[in-house]
Amino acid sequence: MFQSLTPAASDRRKLFRSILFLLGGISAAAAVVLPSKAGGSRTLIIPSNDGYGFEECLKAGSQCGVIVADAWCKAHGLGASKSFAPDTDDPASTNEATPGAYKVTCGDSVD
């Protein structure tokens, strides 16, 4: 009725189990060691000529600015804003910077 494994099949089965055990250990170690993506951020530029007139809210750094920055981040599929400020980067160093622009640092999306 029930056949026992041949010695060669038994050795292959032990080798297969050993390899699976080793791969499982490597996967577990990698999950512990590798950093997660959470906690990251992304900086967006709000150009001064966006047509929405956000400059007044963002200049003052008031609650109005927080609402605008959060909405801008959410509209781009990101988490709440972490900070916002005038973009003081050299316009020659980046294509996105424009005079009078503001930069908003957003948290990662919470999907």
Image (cartoon, rainbow, N blue to C red):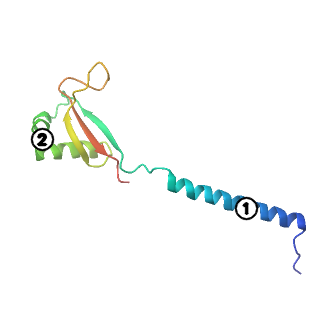
Which label's residue is closer to the chain start, 1 or 2? 1
Q: How many marks?
A: 2
Q: Is residue 11 left or right of residue 17?
A: right
Residue under label 1 = 18
- Mark 1 or mark 2: which is in front? 1
Q: Position of residue 44 (x, y in %)?
A: 29, 36
Q: Position of residue 87 (x, y in %)?
A: 22, 30
How many angstroms separate mark 1 from mark 2 (CA)?
60 Å
Furthest toward the top, the residue is 92
Q: Position of residue 93 (x, y in %)?
A: 31, 21
Q: Position of residue 19 (x, y in %)?
A: 72, 58
Q: Is residue 31 left or right of residue 7?
A: left
- Name the residue type under label 2: Gly
Residue located 51% across and 56% down the image: 32
Tell me the number on the disc at residue 61.
2
Residue located 50% across and 50% down the image: 34
Which is nearer the eye, 1 or 92? Answer: 92
Q: Quadrant of residue 11?
A: bottom right
Q: Is residue 11 left or right of residue 63?
A: right
